[in-house]
Image (cartoon, grey):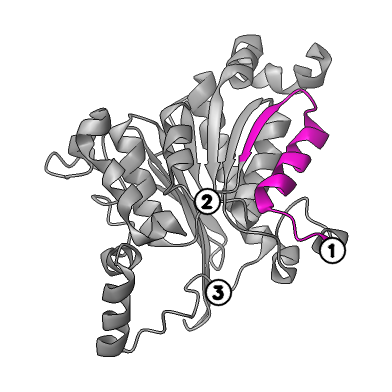
Amino acid sequence: MTERYERQERLFGREGQRKLGEVKVVIAGAGGLGSALAQQLAYLGVREFTLLDPDRLSHTNLNRLVGAYPSDLDSSPQKVELLKRLILQIAPDAHIDAVPKSVVSPEGFAAVRSTDYVFGCVDLDGPRLVLAQICAAYAKPFFDLASEIDPDSTPMTYGGRVFFSDGAWCLRCAAEVDQEEVRRFLMSESELEQHKRLYGLDVGHPEDSGPSVVTINSVIASLAATEFLVEVTGLRRAAPKLTYRGHEGKVTRADIPSHGNCPVCATWGQGEAAGVERYLNTRVASQ
């Protein structure tokens, strides 16, 4: 088994490989980003996974969900089960907890509390910020992945970014989330219906139905897996933010200054005292 990792141990050594084999990770979101990331982490030697996603495979997922095949549509499996199968095909000795639940669930909270690193591969800013707040409360290093295609821009822009937080900054103070989208996500059913009447919001239309391409997802997943790799093995610290501008053919790094007055960062390591369990009483926690 040692020979399997000999080529990558030339980069970060056997001690680095040992650390990868012992670290626990949570992947929240088992779609295009999450599946590409899970594949790469399994190849790197990660062996402890918790996978979170309430959704089942659909026909439109087949253009980007790594490890999913047309024959899988016959049984409409949970996405987390497909990722579990993918990981086990690469690493039969891996331990995988496939949880068909949202991160905003008792099971999702428990997974974050018991892990070492968290990867957010969700589509919307509501669950993205909630996940960031859970990670801050329980002092969990957090990689947030996002791919972006804007078909209305001229010329069309496409790419994405990887964001890393370990207590000095978060998605909120880095202005990486749409606060209005977060507010809608946390509304009750009655509040959402009222918002629809007042502002014409089509609450039945999924906000994550935009373009998605496997190659762009894979670039973002590769950037995240590499930043995780260097962080865990000690090659260097993970970059706070890497942005991939596919339309320009480049990746850029941005450092994020600390924000001492950020209400999310201020809860770092407070656990239950941070009050994040309040999200378990919202509309989204019952879905």
- In primary-sequence order, the first of circles 3 and 2 is 2
- In primary-sequence order, the first of circles 1 and 2 is 1
The mark found on residue 121 in the picture is: 2
Q: Can residue 275 be seen from the camera position used here?
A: yes
Residue at x-position 30% and y-position 67%: 188
- Residue type at mark 1 is Asp
Q: What stretch is highlighted in magenta?
A: 74-98
Camera-nearest residue between 22 and 80: 80
Q: Where residue 61 appears, x then y in whole percent?
A: 70, 65
Cα separation between marks 3 and 2: 15 Å
Q: How crowded is mark 1: few (under 14 residues within 10 Å), some or many (20 or more)?
A: few
Q: Residues within 10 Å of mark 2 (few under 14, many from 20)?
A: many
- Residue type at mark 2 is Cys
Label 2 SS? loop
Residue at x-position 57% and y-position 54%: 54
Residue 82 in magenta? yes
**Mark 1 in CB contact with mark 3 (< 8 angstroms):** no
Residue 29 in magenta? no
Task: Residue lying at the far left in this picture: please name it.
Answer: 261
The mark found on residue 74 in the picture is: 1
Residue at x-position 47% and y-position 80%: 204
